[in-house]
Image: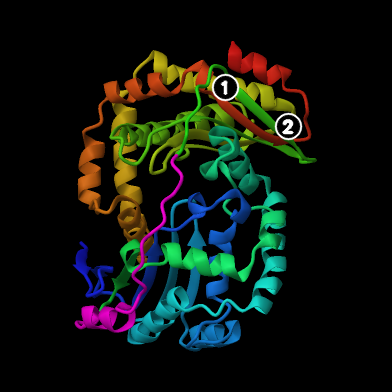
């Protein structure tokens, strides 16, 4: 499906040719994210992403960049996570060279104007405030802080208002030198590709900087002996809740069984939690469950927006469904359906060039190898009911539970009683 090539400067090129399309997603993925920050510069990875769109040596302003992208009917964006950052432009194939030139300039020579940095601080502060006003978004930041504690993997990707306001141009320059390097990047083209795609890649990306990369601070786990509970008081009409536990890293094979367990419990309208929480009891509109892996740790979490007056009942039902997978094996029908659902969801997502670029770009940056969808699905197909139960037994121990709530509540006593019972 994909082709892997190493450019002259050591940069990795990943191409996926889809000749039936007329468009292409061009992307640069970088092993840079908030895990690479100190407390003093928390939020810098995300801020750097913003500054790439504010002007480069070749495209000197945000207006120039926007006009060029709009002028060819393209769309562009970027994303920053804890372990990676990516920039992309989706355009008609005939504009692939312009897209390549713009991306190359954005990641290798942003202007980093001090005036623009100061103006963008206000933009980012408002972005942080926007997220805090959205409980369905902000609860994940709070949950990961609860799960991982006061260390880089537990910090907010965007930082906080004080760290953002204190950032200086020198911080940006040093950060780019330490992480935006050819050995820490992958360039991807997914869609209808010209025959000279490698020539194009070499033309626009062969001069990427070659420096020694910084490393992230490894996660330091602590021994958890009882459930942890945090309530963020906010006047809302419903209670947003995440109940989670520590999970598996990207190099742990158990993450495949944890993925299937998440599908059975909380993906789709026929999942166990959807049936129990929404269909049978009418306690929520949305409920889901999934496993998330990082390089050296992970978590399994259930999220729901529950009726405020029914939050205790909802928590009891969620906990009971998690523990049911410990006490008894899932059924043959559930396991077969979960595997087929995973196969079908991949088929649907694979119709998006952006999904393919992001998936393979991030996978390479984090793992330094690529797993085809067929290889992944073979591993999923091998998962047994016994594997699911074994993972559930390891994950869903009383002392492992972490509960994050956003609601107009303050007293933890009722929740402590439920999780400790």
Task: Find residue 82 and report its horizontal and vertical position in percent.
Answer: 49, 51
Q: Is residue 387 magenta?
A: no
Instruction: Mark 2: give few (<14), some (14-19) or many (20+) Cα within 10 Å.
Output: some
SS assignment at label 1: helix
Q: Nearer the viewer, residue 201 or 242?
A: 201
The x and y percentages for residue 190 are: 31, 70
Q: Which residue is mark 1?
A: 317
For the rendered model, the colour scheme is: rainbow
Residue 308 is labelled as: 2
Asked which quadrant contains residue 378, the reply is top left
Q: Residue at x 28, y 21 (%)?
A: 386
| Residue 314 visible in the displayed image | yes
Q: Residues within 10 Å of mark 1 (few under 14, many from 20)?
A: some
Mark 2 or mark 1: name the one nearer the start of the chain.
2
Q: Position of residue 254 (x, y in %)?
A: 31, 31
Residues shaded magenta: 194-218
Find the distance from the CA under tag 2 to the CA under tag 1. Answer: 15 Å
Using residue 412 as the reference point, say whether residue 352 is left or right of it.
left
Q: Nearer the viewer, residue 175 or 267?
A: 175
Q: Nearer the viewer, residue 298 or 26?
A: 298
């Amino acid at each position: 499906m994909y082709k892997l090539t190493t450019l002259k400067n050591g940069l990795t090129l990943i191409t996926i040719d889809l000749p039936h399309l007329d468009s292409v997603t061009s992307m640069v993925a970088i092993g840079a994210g908030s895990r690479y920050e100190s407390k003093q510069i928390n939020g810098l990875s995300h801020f750097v992403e913003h500054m790439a769109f504010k002007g480069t040596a070749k495209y000197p302003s945000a207006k120039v960049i926007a006009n060029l992208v709009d002028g060819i009917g393209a769309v562009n964006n970027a994303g920053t996570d804890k372990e990676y950052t990516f920039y992309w432009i989706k355009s008609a194939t005939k504009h692939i060279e312009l897209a390549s030139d713009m991306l190359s300039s954005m990641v290798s020579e942003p202007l980093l104007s001090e005036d623009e940095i100061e103006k963008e601080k206000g933009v980012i502060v408002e972005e942080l405030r926007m997220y805090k006003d959205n409980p369905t978004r902000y609860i994940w930041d709070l949950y990961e802080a609860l799960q991982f504690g006061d260390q880089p993997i537990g910090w907010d990707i965007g930082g906080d208002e004080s760290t953002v306001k204190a950032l200086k141009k020198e911080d940006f320059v040093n950060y780019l030198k330490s992480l935006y390097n050819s050995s820490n990047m992958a360039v991807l083209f997914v869609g209808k590709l010209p025959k000279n795609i490698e020539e194009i890649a070499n033309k626009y990306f062969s001069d990427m900087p070659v420096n020694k990369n910084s490393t992230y601070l490894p996660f330091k786990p602590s021994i958890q002996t009882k459930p942890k509970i945090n309530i963020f008081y906010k006047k809302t009409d419903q209670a947003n809740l995440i109940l989670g536990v520590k999970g598996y890293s990207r190099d742990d094979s158990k993450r495949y069984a944890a993925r299937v367990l998440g599908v059975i419990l909380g993906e789709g309208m026929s999942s166990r939690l959807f049936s129990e929480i929404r269909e049978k009891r009418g306690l929520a509109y949305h409920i889901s469950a999934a496993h998330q892996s990082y390089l050296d740790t992970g978590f399994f979490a259930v999220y729901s927006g529950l009726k405020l007056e029914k939050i205790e009942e909802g928590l009891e039902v969620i906990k009971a469904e998690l523990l049911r997978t410990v006490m008894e094996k899932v059924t043959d029908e559930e396991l077969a359906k979960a595997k087929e659902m995973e196969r079908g969801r991949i088929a649907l997502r694979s119709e998006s060039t952006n999904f393919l670029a992001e998936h393979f770009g991030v996978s390479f940056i984090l793992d330094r190898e690529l797993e085809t969808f067929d290889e992944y699905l073979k591993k999923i197909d091998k998962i047994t009911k016994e594997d699911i139960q074994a993972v559930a037994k390891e994950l869903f121990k009383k002392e492992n539970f972490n509960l994050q709530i956003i609601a107009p509540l303050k007293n933890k006593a009722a929740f402590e009683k439920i999780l400790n019972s």
